């Protein structure tokens, strides 16, 4: 079965299904490329890594998102994952006529091989990495926290603190939202000393000793507010400090990963249109 045949596993019957099919096709092109000129010739490794994680993750938010999209167009998401892995692991796969349309398979296979070669966790629990560990293992090309966590088989939250420390020491830099790379050696030598950390403003609304921290309750409160755009600070004010800030952050991060929320360039979050019916049902049931 060719990539085109696999992606057409279900009949597209509506504009919504056409949109989902276009998203899946774009992800295939970002991972493997095409020679007909429709793919972006300058696809970055970070984009390819996102597509690789989307298609190969066996569990977690990426796998859940793949399942959601595939089921919308009657494609077996596990069969799609196995097919993509087979292409990544078979040298002969692109030499046959059925795959003559792919052009970036070598790069995709290199990323897949590097991910498989990443060290396995020492125990069943997620391994904690120090800043020096992360600096040593961080690839030279820009890499997102999510993909680095997938490579190191740990949670992306475990990597935020080491990366922040490395950024403060001028050893790594951000190239996008949650995307980091090592600072080139030539720039390290000429880099000025880091500026002092900004002062943290005083909290205007102290968190109550009995602040709401139950995830399901906080999620319902936050999603209700995010019918209109709000920044994180706005959510704290809107809840008058009665809701756990840490749980609000978890709701926001998980909402972005699951596609329930969007985040604008100005840092404001908003509930995506597809999540509004779910919110209405939850409110009516309450």
Image: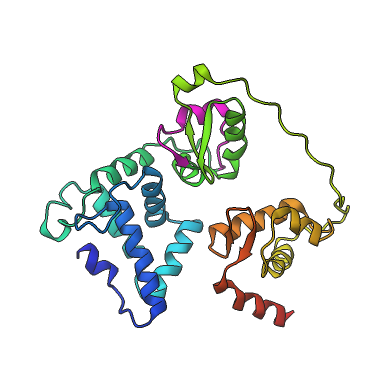
| Front in this rendered view, residue 48 or 109 | 48
Q: Quadrant of the C terminus?
A: bottom right
Q: Please state the extent of the stretch shown in magenta in the rendering.
A: 125-143
Q: For the N terminus, which image quadrant?
A: bottom left
Q: Nearer the viewer, residue 42 or 137?
A: 42
For the residue pair 229 and 275, the one nearer the viewer reads as: 229
Percent of width and height locating residue 97:
11, 58
> What residue sits 84% from the left and 59% below the top?
240
Is the residue 236 above or below the residue 188 in the image? below
The colour scheme used to paint the residues is: rainbow
**Picture quadrant where residue 72 is located:** bottom left
Measuring from the top left, give residue 113's x and y in whole percent: 32, 40
- Left or right: 146 with respect to 207? left
Residue at image position (44%, 20%) is 186
Q: Residue at x 61, y 75 (%)?
A: 276
Q: Quadrant of residue 111?
A: top left
């Amino acid at each position: 079965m060719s990539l085109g045949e696999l992606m057409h596993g279900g009949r597209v019957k509506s504009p919504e299904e056409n949109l989902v099919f276009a998203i899946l096709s774009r992800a295939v092109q970002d991972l493997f490329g095409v020679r007909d000129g429709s793919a972006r010739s300058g696809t970055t490794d970070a984009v390819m890594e996102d597509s690789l994680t989307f298609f190969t993750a066996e569990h977690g938010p990426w796998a859940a998102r793949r399942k959601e999209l595939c089921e919308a167009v009657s494609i077996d998401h596990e069969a799609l994952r196995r097919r993509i892995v087979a292409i990544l692991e078979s040298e002969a796969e692109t030499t046959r006529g059925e795959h003559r349309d792919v052009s970036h398979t070598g790069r995709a296979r290199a990323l897949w091989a590097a991910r498989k070669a990443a060290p396995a966790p020492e125990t069943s629990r997620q391994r904690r990495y120090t800043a020096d560990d992360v600096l040593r293992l961080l690839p030279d090309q820009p890499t997102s926290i999510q993909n680095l966590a997938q490579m190191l088989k740990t949670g992306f939250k475990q990597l935020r603190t080491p990366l922040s420390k490395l950024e403060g020491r001028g050893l790594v830099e951000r190239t996008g939202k949650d995307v980091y790379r090592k600072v080139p050696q030539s720039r390290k030598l000429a880099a000025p000393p880091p500026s002092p950390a900004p002062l943290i403003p005083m909290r205007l609304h102290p968190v109550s000793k009995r602040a709401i921290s139950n995830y399901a309750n906080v999620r319902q409160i936050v999603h209700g507010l995010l019918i209109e755009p709000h920044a994180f600070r706005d959510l704290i004010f809107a809840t008058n400090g009665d809701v756990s800030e840490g749980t609000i952050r978890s709701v926001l991060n998980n909402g972005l990963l699951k596609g329930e929320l969007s985040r604008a360039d100005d840092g404001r979050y908003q509930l995506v249109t597809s999540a509004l019916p779910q919110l209405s049902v939850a409110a009516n049931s309450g």
